[in-house]
């Protein structure tokens, strides 16, 4: 059973199998925690959520035990001197592969899992050394370096390419720093004096002192104590994450360590934004109808979180009209605030057919990743490649940031980490469009489903950069007209409003279809997510909250708002 990390559900074919499973699934009473709420039933009360969290924790524990035992089993077989491992193991592996519809370890009770451990050898756990020719073709070589040659098809664009590499005209350099030049367009905030007011607020703002970091509180369980998984505590972070998943209709047996870890990280990442701004916001909104003082206070709080003028106006208007209609108790007022934020974050999706961005299976998808240098493009590509690989997609990376030699090396390292091949050109001053051309050929010949294209974030000047992006896009359109193309802009959340001004430059050329918001860990400017959708009109597709390979996930407005406003 392959979990699709883009869609946050099992792949359709697998789902069909799981849905057909009831005939063979053990009766409900043999589930790990028979006293827990029915899996199809969403918890209603705090006690139900706690019970749900306990069930999820126990399931994770059971899975872990089974995995550890399976690994031990494989190691034991490997080291058995008299057993010709490479001769005998593959058969069982192939048998396992041929019968993927028996996902015993995913949902069975502890006792069943223990029985299953004796015979089960999940394919992905088998070390490379035991792979035979039958499994080898599916294991991609760490990287391929393809010689990129400027083809006839790229020739018509040659004049553009000739300008790339000229160093004489260093004029409007695109920088990933707050000092970046404002684009030619008149900034939206210049419409009134609010920016000036905001600057004054900023200057006089008293930042709340960083609280002493205490270890996460362990959660007291009413009846039974929960046996702890090493380095993975059943703490309030776990319970909060479990609650967020339960509220979205997830089942306790489907929850994984990675999902919980991600949610805990997201909440922790938004901690500064929450502490500096949101807590005060909650206090004001929770007091009932808004008077003029309260409105001004909310306005300044939102502006400090880089929510931006447009989004701030929208939030205040929505709150005011609701609170004028009826007096809401604090909890209901907060719930309404959450609803406003969620609706705003989802607003660009109303036009789009895809609420979640996932590569289409058995189709050629090309995702062009753009953004200024340092925003996190290469890291994002590595993380998306990892998600794609885990979700069962055939993926390939094109190293088309040829402006910096180090960038190509960096993307190759990420390719190795995620187990995805990289098409690159080892030469100097390579034409990035030619790399993309070769990567498309390579992708087509091997049935790639997702091609990720890394691009330069900085050239001699803005015009050259935009010309280069335009040329790459034309090559993609021409060479792969059948492909589903996404053009994602990577934005550094720590830059707040400055990042948005840079985004406007890209939006003009790169035919953007979405945004990846990075570095949400530890910034006080988490509110920029709201500004992104309101000012750019683009959906946020992924968010990054750390430098690790697991620290990026598809964006969920529900999870983001819960993390932003969690207690
Ligand atoms: N804390 C944190 N750091 C991140 C995140 N994403 C990327 N980074 C870091 O940001 C730095 C720049 O990331 P890159 O991926 O090299 O950025 P880039 O846009 O490819 O930069 P160029 O190759 O110069 O164009 C690296 O140190 C990354 O580890 C994130 O979500 N959180």
Image (tube, grey):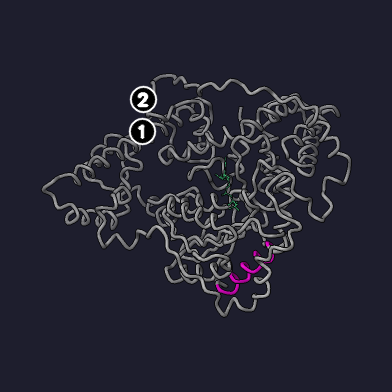
Label 1 to label 2: alpha-carbon separation: 9 Å
Is 363 left, or right, of 527 in this rendering?
Answer: left
Residue at image position (13%, 46%) is 81
Tag shown at residue 287: none
Tell me, yes or no, whether the highlighted magenta stretch contains residue 542. no
Placement of 188 over or under 484, stated as above or below: above
The residues colored magenta run 465-479
In the rendered view, tell whether residue 66 sits above or below residue 275: below
User: Which residue is labeled 2 in the image?
Assistant: 227
Query: Any magenta on residue 466?
Result: yes
User: Does the CB distance between marks 1 and 2 fall below 8 Å?
Assistant: yes
Which of the 4 image quarters holds residue 145?
bottom left
Tell me which label, 1 or 2, sits earlier in the chain.
1
Front-most of 246 and 538? Answer: 538
Q: In the rendering, which numbered label is found on residue 61?
A: 1
Q: Which residue is depicted at the point 68% across and 27% down? A: 279
Q: Is residue 153 above or below residue 311?
A: below
Q: Quadrant of the C terminus?
A: top right
Tell me the SS state at disc 2: loop
Spot the residue most to the right.
192
Residue with the most extreme bottom position: 152
Q: Is residue 444 above or below residue 328?
A: below
Check the image and name the residue furthest to the left.
82
Q: Position of residue 106 (x, y in %)?
A: 35, 43
């Amino acid at each position: 059973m392959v979990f699709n990390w883009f869609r946050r559900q099992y792949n359709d074919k697998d789902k069909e199998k799981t849905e057909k499973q009831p005939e063979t699934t053990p009766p409900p009473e043999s589930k790990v925690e028979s006293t827990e709420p029915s899996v199809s039933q969403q918890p209603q009360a705090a006690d139900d959520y706690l019970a749900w969290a306990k069930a999820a924790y126990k399931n994770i524990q059971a899975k872990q035990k089974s995995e550890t035992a399976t690994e031990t089993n494989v190691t034991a077989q490997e080291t058995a001197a008299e057993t010709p491992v490479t001769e005998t193991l593959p058969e069982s592996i192939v048998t396992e592969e041929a019968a993927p519809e028996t996902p015993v370890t995913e949902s069975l009770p502890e006792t069943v899992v223990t029985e299953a451990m004796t015979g089960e050898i999940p394919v992905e756990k088998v070390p490379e050394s035991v792979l035979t020719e039958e499994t080898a073709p599916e294991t991609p070589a760490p990287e391929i370096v393809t010689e990129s040659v400027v083809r006839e098809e790229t020739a018509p664009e040659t004049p553009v390419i000739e300008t790339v590499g000229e160093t004489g005209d260093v004029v409007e350099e695109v920088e990933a720093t707050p000092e970046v030049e404002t684009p030619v367009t008149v900034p939206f905030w210049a419409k009134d004096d609010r920016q000036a007011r905001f600057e004054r607020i900023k200057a006089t703002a008293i930042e709340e002192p960083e609280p002493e970091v205490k270890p996460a509180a362990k959660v007291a369980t009413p009846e039974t104590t929960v046996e702890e998984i090493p380095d993975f505590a059943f703490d309030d972070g776990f319970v909060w994450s479990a609650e967020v998943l339960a509220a979205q209709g997830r089942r306790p047996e489907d929850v994984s360590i990675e999902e919980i870890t991600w949610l805990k990280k997201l909440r922790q990442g938004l901690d500064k934004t929450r502490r500096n701004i949101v807590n005060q916001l909650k206090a004001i909104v929770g007091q009932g109808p808004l008077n003029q003082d309260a409105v001004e206070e909310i306005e300044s709080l939102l502006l400090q979180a880089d929510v931006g003028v447009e989004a701030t106006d929208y939030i205040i208007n929505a709150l005011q009209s609701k609170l004028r209609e009826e007096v809401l108790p604090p909890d209901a007022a907060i719930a309404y605030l959450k609803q406003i934020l969620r609706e705003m974050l989802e607003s660009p999706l109303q036009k789009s057919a895809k609420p979640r961005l996932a590569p289409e299976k058995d189709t050629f998808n090309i995702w062009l990743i753009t953004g200024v240098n340092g925003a996190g493009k290469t890291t994002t590509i590595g993380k998306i490649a990892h998600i794609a690989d885990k979700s069962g997609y055939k993926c390939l990376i094109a190293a088309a940031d040829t402006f910096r030699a180090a960038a190509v090396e960096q993307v190759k390292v990420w390719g190795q980490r995620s187990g995805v091949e990289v098409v690159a050109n080892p030469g100097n001053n390579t034409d990035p469009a030619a790399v993309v051309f070769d990567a498309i050929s390579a992708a087509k010949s091997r049935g790639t489903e997702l091609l990720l294209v890394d691009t330069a974030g900085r050239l001699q000047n803005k015009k050259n950069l935009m010309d280069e992006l335009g040329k790459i896009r034309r090559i993609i359109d021409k060479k792969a007209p059948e492909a589903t193309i996404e053009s994602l802009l990577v934005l550094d959340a720590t830059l707040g409003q400055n990042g948005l001004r840079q985004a406007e430059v890209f939006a003009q050329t790169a035919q953007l279809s979405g945004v990846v918001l990075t570095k949400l860990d530890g910034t006080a400017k988490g509110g920029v997510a709201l500004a992104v959708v309101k000012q750019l009109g683009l959906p946020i597709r992924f968010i990054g909250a750390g430098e690790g390979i697991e620290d990026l996930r598809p964006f969920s407005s529900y999870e983001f708002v819960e993390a932003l406003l969690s207690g």
